[in-house]
Image: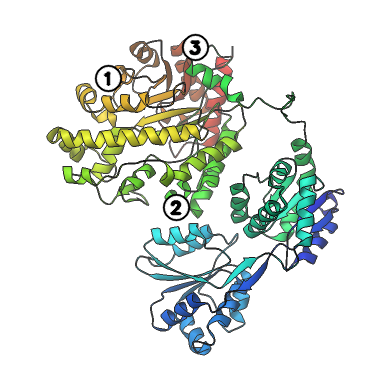
């Protein structure tokens, strides 16, 4: 992009750099903006840093296997903290003998000052995700002691990721962030923001965000600041800073491809004008509704929600199970950086991958990005995801005694990351697009917990089910209560509908399903928030359809193993249905996809209450263009 096309055109731009304040102001002026740069923080060394001293002693005695240096300033502070307590030369020599990771060029420079060369450099954007990705290229971290030089605050995500890999984390704080000695300029910037005198805000660290909020609270203008952020452009230097911004409830409008100050200013200069124009359109007030603003529950009369209620729609709504998944390059790029379980526990990324899929496909509903099994962790099940093998439960349930050790899920506090994913996705989606929450059904969760993972014949599950009905009942009741709490939590946090996935129920005969499974599905659905549509979906055995309908579910999911018209007749036309194109059809060609989509629509016969979907999730090999072609075909053929 030529410099002449990159121009703020006189916009008022606030930033909060400290050491590089003058450089930031120069960048803003160069790009045609009016700079309001106020230092927001300073590094303060920790007096008598016992943690650093303990780390040095453990390093010298051979107890540390790997060291992660996260900032250049912090590395220098570490050396100052320990030099009175251990021999500096011996410390550096011992450090050079273990694996060292340097987070960015400033750390590399600081290490070179003392003739150290890091074993590995963390690539841009230098977040905890890249650190863990490098860790994964090294020999197993299992049982290793990893020293982490912290910068200001502990990085909970990095610590959790290391511990998940079996490492023992030794945190080494070396300095703390404090407000600048002169807070006057920062207070002036916050006041200007609250008055509406700033157009664009640039953040280059998470601590800047926290200190901005702290000063607003001190000035008594937190509410004004929150309102102001809805009408200005917020640009973030990278993912870690974006996470902090979103944690405050503010929306990130811009993030550069390269997480550096120059690209941050350049992208803000190039794109702030149109974003600002959009954000400053008239909005709904307490006394007047703007015609530009959608009603707060615009999703209520969407085609998807109307179909759930058996109401006529202008078009058949369509969404696709696994619509955010491995078939999309954007998703694969995220997964290269983040292990699957960590992705599921990162609300911002979960929202990002789902909203990206929704935008590309043009579907009529979104479903939260998560997995069936993380809800088992707070119940005492030890879960990991092994590459190529999928989920693994390391302490499976096989006996009545094992059932007794399954913890009761009392609330959703241990699953706060899922609740935040619901909130974040709801916030990021267009207001007219419904959001679907989901959970595994009691039988499917029980099967995973008993088998320890996926299974071909479910021998352990059926053995417990047949041989110990009391233990089976206890386990299923406990799971049913947990699922009810879990789904109601999703509803409370912004889900407009929920789907119950019984992925493994097809292994059961109808009579066994009726006796051993149906009562617990009924228990879940009857315990959910009234008025919220429930989609009851089980795969593998069309003979179960009448039993799926023997619940209070508003919608019955239909897989591809039966004709949709036969399925709807079986479940009754007083229920909506969802389905049911064979997923493998998307591996063919566009002409075949359109023909088969028309066939499913013909079976529905234009009757109100049909939600188009696949009979199961999108296959990994599916071309994205084929999924888009399917959505377009459904909309084209069903337009009324």
Residue identifier under label 1: 543
Assign a secondary structure to mark 3: loop
Q: Is residue 360 visible?
A: no
Question: For mark 3, does the 10 Å Cα neighbourhood hold few (<14), some (14 to 19), or many (20 or more) residues?
Answer: many
On screen, residue 600 versus residue 274, left or right, reads left
Residue 126 percent across, percent down from the top left: 58, 62
Above or below 2: residue 20: below
Residue 560 percent across, percent down from the top left: 37, 24
Distance from Cα at disc 1 to Cα at disc 2: 38 Å
Q: Which corner quadrant holds the C terminus?
A: top right
Question: For mark 2, does the 10 Å Cα neighbourhood hold few (<14), some (14 to 19), or many (20 or more) residues?
Answer: some
On screen, residue 237 versus residue 182, left or right, reads left
Q: Earlier in the sequence, mark 2 or mark 3?
A: 2
Q: Find residue 574 and report its image quarter.
A: top left
Q: Find residue 77 and report its image quarter.
A: bottom right
Q: Is residue 188 visible?
A: yes
Above or below 187: residue 139: below
Distance from Cα at disc 1 to Cα at disc 3: 24 Å
Judging depth in this view, the residue of 194 and 325 nearest the camera is 194
Residue identifier under label 2: 339
Judging depth in this view, the residue of 635 and 175 nearest the camera is 175
Residue 554 percent across, percent down from the top left: 42, 19
Judging depth in this view, the residue of 187 and 405 nearest the camera is 187
Residue identifier under label 3: 608
Assign a secondary structure to mark 2: loop
| Residue contact at pointers 1 and 2, CB within 8 angstroms | no
Residue 254 percent across, percent down from the top left: 69, 47
| Residue contact at pointers 1 and 3, CB within 8 angstroms | no
Q: Find residue 27 and report its image quarter.
A: bottom right
Which residue is located at x 14 percent, y 33 percent? 466
């Amino acid at each position: 992009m030529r410099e002449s096309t990159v121009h703020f055109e006189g916009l008022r731009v606030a930033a909060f750099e400290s050491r590089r304040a003058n450089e930031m102001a120069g960048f803003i002026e160069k790009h045609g903006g009016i700079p309001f740069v106020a230092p927001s923080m300073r590094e303060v060394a920790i007096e008598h840093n016992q943690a650093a001293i303990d780390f040095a002693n453990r390093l010298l005695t051979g107890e540390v296997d790997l060291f992660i240096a996260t900032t250049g300033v912090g590395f220098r502070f570490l050396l100052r903290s320990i030099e009175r307590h251990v021999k500096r030369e011996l410390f550096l020599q011992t450090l050079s003998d273990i694996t060292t990771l340097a987070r960015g060029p400033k750390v590399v420079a600081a290490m070179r000052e003392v003739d150290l060369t890091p074993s590995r450099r963390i690539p841009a954007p230098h977040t905890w995700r890249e650190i863990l990705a490098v860790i994964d290229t090294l020999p197993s971290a299992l049982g290793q002691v990893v020293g982490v030089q912290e910068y200001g605050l502990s990085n909970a995500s990095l610590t959790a990721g290391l511990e998940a890999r079996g490492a023992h984390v030794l945190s080494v704080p070396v300095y703390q962030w404090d407000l600048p000695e002169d807070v006057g300029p920062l207070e002036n910037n916050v006041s200007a923001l609250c008055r509406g005198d700033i157009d664009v805000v640039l953040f280059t660290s998470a601590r800047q965000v926290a200190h901005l909020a702290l000063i607003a609270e001190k000035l008594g203008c937190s509410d004004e600041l929150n309102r102001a952020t809805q009408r200005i452009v917020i640009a973030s230097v990278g993912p870690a800073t974006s996470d902090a911004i979103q944690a405050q409830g503010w929306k990130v409008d811009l993030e550069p491809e390269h997480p550096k100050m120059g690209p941050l200013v350049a992208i803000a200069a190039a794109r702030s004008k149109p974003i600002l124009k959009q954000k400053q359109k008239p909005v709904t007030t307490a006394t007047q509704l703007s015609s530009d603003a959608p009603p707060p529950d615009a999703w209520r009369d969407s085609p998807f929600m109307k179909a759930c209620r058996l109401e006529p729609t202008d078009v058949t709504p369509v969404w696709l199970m696994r619509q955010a998944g491995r078939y999309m390059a954007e998703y694969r790029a995220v997964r290269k950086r983040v292990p699957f379980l960590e992705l599921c526990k990162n609300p911002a990324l979960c929202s990002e991958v789902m909203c990206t899929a929704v935008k590309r496909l043009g579907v009529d509903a979104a479903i939260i990005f998560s997995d069936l099994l993380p809800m088992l962790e707070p119940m005492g099940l030890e879960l990991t995801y092994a590459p190529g093998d999928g989920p693994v439960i390391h302490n499976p349930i096989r006996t009545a005694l094992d059932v007794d050790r399954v913890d009761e899920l009392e609330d959703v506090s241990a699953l706060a990351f899922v609740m935040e994913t619901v909130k974040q996705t709801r916030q990021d989606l267009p207001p007219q697009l419904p959001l679907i929450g989901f959970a595994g059904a009691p039988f499917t969760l029980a099967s995973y917990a008993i088998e320890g993972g996926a299974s071909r014949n479910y021998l352990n599950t059926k053995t417990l089910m047949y041989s110990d009905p009391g233990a089976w009942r206890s386990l299923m009741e406990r799971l049913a209560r947990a699922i009810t709490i879990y789904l109601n939590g999703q509803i409370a946090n912004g889900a407009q509908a929920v789907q119950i996935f019984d992925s493994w129920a097809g292994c059961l005969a109808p009579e066994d399903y009726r006796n051993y499974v149906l009562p617990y599905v009924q228990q879940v659905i009857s315990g959910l928030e009234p008025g919220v549509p429930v989609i009851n979906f089980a795969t593998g055995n069309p003979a179960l359809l009448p039993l799926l309908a023997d619940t209070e579910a508003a919608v019955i999911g239909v897989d591809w193993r039966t004709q949709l018209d036969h399925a709807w007749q079986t479940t009754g036309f007083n229920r909506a249905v969802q389905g049911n194109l064979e997923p493998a059809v998307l591996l063919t060609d566009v002409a075949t996809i359109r023909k088969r989509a028309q066939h499913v629509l013909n079976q529905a016969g234009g009757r109100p209450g049909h939600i188009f979907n696949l009979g199961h999730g999108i296959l990994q090999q599916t071309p994205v263009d084929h999924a888009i072609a399917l959505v377009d075909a459904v909309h084209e053929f069903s337009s009324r």
